Amino acid sequence: MSENRALSSASEWSVPERRLAAIFAADIAGYSKAMHADESGAMRALQATRRIVDRMIAARHGRIANTAGDSVLAEFASVMDAVCCAVAIQRALAEAEGEAAQFRLRIGIHLGDIMVHDGDLFGDGVNIAARLQSAAEPGALRLSEAAYLQVRGLSEIPFIDLGPQRLKNIARPVRVYAVPPPDQRTSRAIRAGRARAALRPTLGAVAVLAAAGLALTWPRLVGSERTDGPGEPLRPRLSLVVLPLANQSGEADQDYLAEQLAEDLSADLARAPGTFVIAHGTAQAYRGRPVEPRAVGRELGVRYVVQGSLRQSGEQVRFAVQLTDAETGAALWADRYDGPRTAVGAAQDVLVAQVGRALGVRLLEAATQARSGQPADAVDLVMRGQALLNRPFARDNHAQARPLFERALGLDPANVDARLGLAEVLVDGVLNGWTTERTADLDTAEQAIASVLQGDPTHPFAHYLRGETLRARSRYAEALAAFDRVLTLNPSFARAYAYRGLIQIFLGRAEETERDIAAAIRLSPKDPLLGAWLARDGLAKLHLGQDQEAIEPLRRAAAVNPLFDFPHLYLACAFARLGRDVEARASLAEFLRLRPGYTLARYRSLTSTDPTFLAQRARIYEGLRRAGLPEG
């Protein structure tokens, strides 16, 4: 990053000052290419980017020591300031519009001893920061272990351990930590780091893998069960392996994409609580070999096998995946995802999240069915409850799930998944008017969520449910912050996007709802809550006066989940405002069939103090009156 200035003689050098500092090294990704293509445009974009960077460095009490074209070298008194500044810069550039949106930074941060001469920075610490910067991907941040140890308590920042790394011209390996870009378009190294992090607790307890026979010693996990004869390995209930995907494209240069998709899918599934996933490196041993799922299950001691393929036809790519029961060889589920070839790289994380979500649901269903007829323990009861909640959103499913979670807590009061499952049932009941014990249920849900967060302050689902309880109490700004926290901890949490979109309506920002709902659907296009998400999109359009545009998502919502009532209410409003009275009355009749006795006074209880919201809500009241909803 920094070069010695040309000096006329060594006598001009004074003794440099030495001090410990957080060293911040950054450069612009793709700057040279942009300058070659359009010098004037690149210069304007550079200036816009530098205005953001300089302002944020100053705000965090940093000092810029050197700039050279597209690079910035700065020092901070604390690593905390340096890292928070770097994260804020990356987020600001990711959300920027106009010329500043053209560029992304690569940033490296190291804590070390520096020499300061004439305001510039020198020393081995500067070199390490520069090497970390050059290894970072656009929009990302990399830290040395020395820097990471100063900020590891920042739970809202997703640090990923990349392990010891060899840096150019640095004698000893440096342990490196990454913070992925805000848009989560991550490199293979970061994805591998995520996989290691997800598997570390499991592998630390279980992995004793013989080099020659894949002889695996499993832990006695809660809920594990022996499925084969004496001497056979224990198979944890939700254990699986993702085998290498078959590249059916006939193009060897596409092998890397098939490999990355399999690796990412393994990592995504490994993050699911209670799931044991064989490491991708072991799964690679089956590449190019004809495999029989039951044999693989016996060799690796897993209950399920995931297989898939990647096929290209012209400009289209198909990613197909299948879940097989390794005990019986029966195919439990299969699906495929299609898209343009040019978009596969950009959409890879979204694609993997979709498959991971779908597989997670099927694994729960399969494990629950396999246990039918056997005595229920706490783990089994939780899985049965979760399987019910993974069905289309409906009052009956929640009513059946509640006693299962309560029984699980009776058997195991410390079971985190049972606590959160019960909290989800209770808060959903409050939000949907399914309970006559609103205050008591909401208090119980909040207590359960608080107990989980006390033990694990970074639990994404607990933060999501906390956001839902805040929504139930009409504390919308706090709910929005809770959903933002969820997405910091887990950027693939589709529900957090969906309900952040709903919160935008109550905060008078309905124009932002569609983007959040679209993000949720991209991540989980077949989610059990899809009908509710589409209904929120339609409601936002009604708030914005887009009555005609609201009809399509509301009709889709009603078709996806016929048991969900509110799409029919919103359709009645839209049709009434458009003068389509017959359709309005028919939609209202269907709503009242599903929710008899509902009145306009009941709808008014779902309110906010935001003036924009109140003005927009008046239009909804008018439409519902025209449709014939009783005042109450």
Image: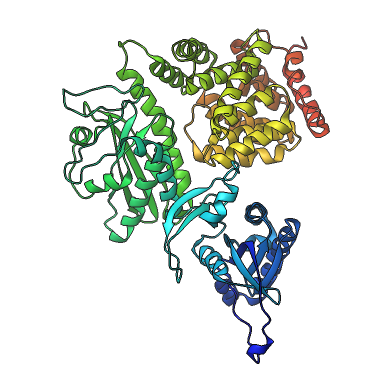
From the top left corner, tell me how far across and down residue 251 is, in percent.
29, 59
From the top left corner, tell me how far across and down residue 198 is, in percent.
42, 40
**Residue 39 seen by the camera:** yes
Q: Nearer the viewer, residue 574 or 134?
A: 134
Residue drawn at x 47%, y 32% as measured from the top left: 526
Q: Tell me the quarter of the image containing the C terminus.
A: top right
- Residue 531 falls in which quadrant of the image? top right
Residue drawn at x 69%, y 27% as measured from the top left: 574
- Residue 232 falls in which quadrant of the image? top left
Q: Is residue 22 above or below residue 197?
A: below
From the top left corner, tell me how far across and down residue 192 is, in percent.
41, 50
Q: Describe residue 381's horizontal placement relative to residue 35 as left or right.
A: left
Residue drawn at x 43%, y 64% as measured from the top left: 172
From the top left corner, tell me how far across and down residue 221 is, in percent.
34, 26
In this view, which residue lies farthest toward the front? Answer: 15
Q: Is residue 14 above or below residue 432?
A: below
Q: Nearer the viewer, residue 357 or 594?
A: 357
Q: How many marks?
A: 0
Q: Describe residue 580's horizontal placement relative to residue 525 as left or right.
A: right
Residue drawn at x 65%, y 36% as measured from the top left: 549
Q: Tell me the quarter of the image containing the N terminus.
A: bottom right
Q: Describe residue 123's horizontal placement relative to residue 309 as left or right.
A: right
- Residue 219 falls in which quadrant of the image? top left
Q: How is the image coloured?
A: rainbow
**Residue 547 seen by the camera:** no
Q: Describe residue 59's horizontal placement relative to residue 564 as left or right.
A: right
